[in-house]
């Protein structure tokens, strides 16, 4: 069985600026064609299958101008980067003027070099697509006003924060129905057949340049969501949903192209059914951040085929840095969870080093932060151990734990196994801030009558245990607060 990909997200402009600073260069950024071998090597974190280069498309000058006058955005920029200069504000990568690789990165040629360099390291390339909106200076606006949700002058006069007048037309500003409109983007109409055809064409061109696409806020384009958001402004919903219509067309040209959805509101299953290979698992993130072992365990009772198509993460460019959100020990325990669950683990560039400052996506530079060497060592060992074990190609099973009438600390212990034809592995995590003890019955019926050795992949410590005990009452574990371990299970040598 092929395991879902391990994804490494990289904020492209920020990373390039950081590489140039470390090389002692002047000015902003580096062309993707000019990077040294060592820069590409550092993206190949242990176990990674794919690098998602976030923010490669041409950013909007009009959108940047709007950002420069927004007091709230400017405050967030200065919070992240106290020595902020105007040149640090590159504009939002989700306010796209054209789906053309930014010339600061070397344009289409630079992107081709990036793909080739990653391929040499056994890594695929993912890029972004924003289906819901475009920048106010996107060429579709003058050329194809029928692609957009429209209003009239009365709408604009009544609510200029929600509508924008451009080229003699009034358009709705892009929005998520639960938040105010975004001031720098214009809303596309998911019900417009011409827009669907144009979306498929753009995605097909993107597919010529990469192996997969992460679709921003994908659920906003679903027929029922779009109808609730826009009502009669969008017109009559077509009989077929947006994503099946678009993805079917794109896969006609790129049958092996991977589609990953940013998804919320418990719509992951529906988006999988509409053609996405993988969807964000924000619910798991929330439960890990809250430190709720019972909620995490219940979350993992979902259908296994569904879980294999979820993207598990502790941070990404939209979430706070994990090192600033989780306690130090809780973060390590949560990392073991994410690394060893079915699905596609996502690691964010800088996460493994313990970076704490979340850089707004508008910025092209980040502050200097000393790496947490201990955390980097821990992450590296964890990811390499999971990769080398091959466990994620096997069969996964959630385990129940048992305790005692006077000790219910077992409820904080999470456990699961992986098994292939050649290997067996056990993961145990105390996801609480107090010591915990539990019995963990192992699920393999052939354990009885012999001694088995459990070898920690994190410390190389070994334990020999009788197979009958491992099945019933189960392996006894005593774990410190937030302690986690991964064991290879095999017959003990005579």
Image (tube, rainbow, N blue to C red):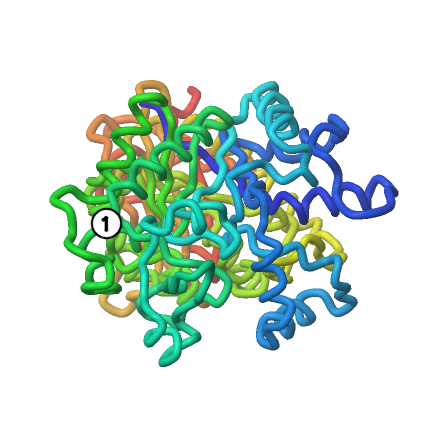
Locate residue 232 relative to residue 25 in the image: left or right: left
Q: Where 148 sits versus 164, above or below?
A: above
Instruction: Give the residue displayed 57% in from the left and 21% down from the top.
Output: 119
Front in this rendered view, residue 442 or 289: 289
**Pointer 1 residue:** 191
Please indicate, yes or no, whether residue 414 appears anywhere in the rendered image: no
Q: Which quadrant is home to the N terminus?
A: top left
Q: Quadrant of residue 359?
A: bottom right
Front in this rendered view, residue 375 or 180: 180
Instruction: Give the residue displayed 20% in from the left and 30% down from the top.
Output: 445
Residue 446, image x, y percentages: 22, 26
Q: Where 52 sits versus 204, above or below?
A: below
Residue 22, image x, y percentages: 82, 43
| Element assignment for label 1 | loop
Locate residue 34 relative to residue 216 in the image: left or right: right
Residue 20, image x, y percentages: 79, 42
């Amino acid at each position: 069985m092929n395991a879902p990909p391990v994804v490494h997200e990289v904020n492209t402009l920020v990373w390039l600026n950081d590489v140039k600073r470390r090389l002692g260069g002047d000015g902003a950024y580096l062309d993707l064609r000019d990077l040294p071998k060592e820069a590409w090597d550092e993206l190949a974190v242990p176990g990674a299958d794919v690098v998602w280069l976030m923010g490669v498309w041409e950013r909007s000058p009009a959108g940047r101008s709007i950002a420069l006058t927004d007091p709230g955005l400017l405050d967030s920029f200065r919070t992240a980067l106290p020595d902020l200069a105007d040149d640090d504000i590159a504009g939002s990568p989700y306010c796209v003027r054209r789906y053309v690789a930014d010339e600061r990165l070397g344009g289409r040629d630079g992107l081709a070099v990036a793909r080739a360099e990653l391929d040499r390291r056994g890594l695929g390339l993912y890029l972004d697509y924003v289906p819901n909106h475009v920048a106010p200076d996107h060429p579709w606006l003058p050329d194809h006003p029928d692609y957009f949700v429209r209003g009239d002058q009365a709408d604009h006069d009544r609510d200029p924060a929600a509508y924008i007048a451009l080229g003699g037309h009034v358009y709705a500003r892009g929005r998520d129905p639960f938040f105010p409109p975004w001031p720098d983007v214009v809303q596309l109409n998911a019900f417009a057949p011409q827009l669907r055809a144009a979306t498929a064409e753009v995605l097909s061109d993107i597919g010529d340049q990469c192996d997969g696409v992460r679709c921003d806020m994908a659920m906003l384009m679903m027929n029922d969501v779009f109808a609730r958001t826009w009502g009669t402004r969008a017109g009559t919903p077509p009989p077929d949903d947006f994503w099946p219509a678009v993805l079917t067309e794109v896969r006609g040209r790129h049958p092996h192209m991977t589609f990953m959805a940013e998804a919320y509101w418990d719509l992951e299953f529906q988006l999988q059914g509409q053609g996405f290979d993988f969807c964000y698992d924000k619910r798991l993130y929330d439960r890990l951040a809250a430190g709720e072992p019972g909620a995490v365990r219940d979350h993992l009772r979902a259908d296994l085929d569904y879980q294999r198509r979820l993207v598990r993460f502790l941070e990404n460019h939209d979430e706070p840095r994990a090192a600033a959100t989780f306690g130090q020990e809780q973060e390590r325990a949560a990392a073991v969870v994410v690394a060893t669950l079915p699905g596609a683990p996502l690691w964010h560039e800088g996460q493994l080093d313990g970076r704490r400052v979340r850089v707004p996506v508008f910025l092209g530079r980040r502050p200097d932060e000393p790496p947490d060497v201990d955390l980097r060592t821990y992450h590296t060992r964890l990811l390499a151990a999971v990769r080398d074990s091959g466990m994620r190609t096997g069969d996964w099973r959630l385990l129940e734990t048992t305790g005692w009438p006077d000790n219910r600390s077992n409820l904080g212990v999470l456990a699961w196994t992986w098994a292939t034809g050649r290997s067996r592995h056990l993961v145990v995590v105390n996801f609480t801030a107090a010591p915990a003890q539990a019995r963990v019955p192992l699920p393999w019926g052939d354990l009885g009558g012999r001694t088995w050795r459990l070898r920690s992949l994190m410390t190389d410590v070994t334990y020999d245990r009788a197979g009958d005990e491992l099945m019933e009452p189960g392996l006894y574990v005593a774990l410190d607060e937030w302690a986690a371990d991964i064991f290879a299970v095999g017959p003990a040598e005579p």
